[in-house]
Every structure is written in structure tokens, then in C-alpha cells.
Image (cartoon, rainbow, N blue to C red):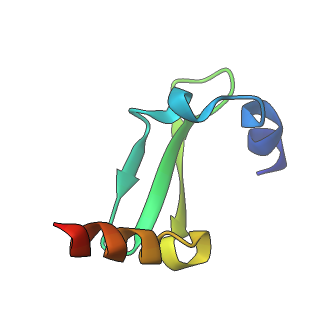
Amino acid sequence: MAEIAEHYQYWELEDFDTMFYLTGDSLGLIVTVLGSDEYICIEAKLSDLGLDEWIAASLAER
């Protein structure tokens, strides 16, 4: 994980535009393994990111 964090720390958020996914309660980033065609999915709960309130507010506005 430290190697992944070091490699991606300078990436802009826009670089992940097509490299993410959402589940019912999580946000995932898809990152490639350095020097490989393999990838890793890193997932965090929306509540841990503070996004669950933002999503609820967005849905309420509809």
C-alpha cells in the first residue's frame, strides 16, 4: 500500500475519472500495479469519506 500511495500521490483527481466504481455504500478506486497489467481495487466506505451526507443532500434536491 505504501508503494501505491507513493506512486499516485501526485496524480490529479481527474486522472481517476474512469478508474472508479460505486457500490451501495462505498467508493472504489482502480489502480494499476506498477510495471504490470494487473490492477488493485481500493475501496472506502462513503461514511468514512464524509460523502454519505453529500449524496443524501444531492438525492433530496431531485
Residue 41, given in percent of the width and then of the height, sits at 51, 51
- Using the image, determine if residue 48 lies above or below residue 17: below
Residue for point 43% across, 69% down: 54
Residue for point 56% across, 38% down: 31
Residue for point 30% across, 66% down: 58
Q: Nearer the viewer, residue 42 or 52?
A: 52
User: Is 21 left, or right, of 15 in this rendering?
Assistant: left
User: In the displayed image of the protein, which residue is found farthest to the top?
Assistant: 35
Residue 22, given in percent of the width and then of the height, sits at 35, 58
User: Is 34 left, or right, of 36 in this rendering?
Assistant: right
Residue 2, given in percent of the width and then of the height, sits at 83, 48
- Using the image, determine if residue 55 lies above or below residue 21: below
Residue 62, given in percent of the width and then of the height, sits at 16, 66
- Using the image, determine if residue 8 lies above or below residue 36: below
Q: Which image quarter: residue 59?
A: bottom left
Q: Nearer the viewer, residue 60 or 29?
A: 60
Q: Nearer the viewer, residue 33 or 62?
A: 62
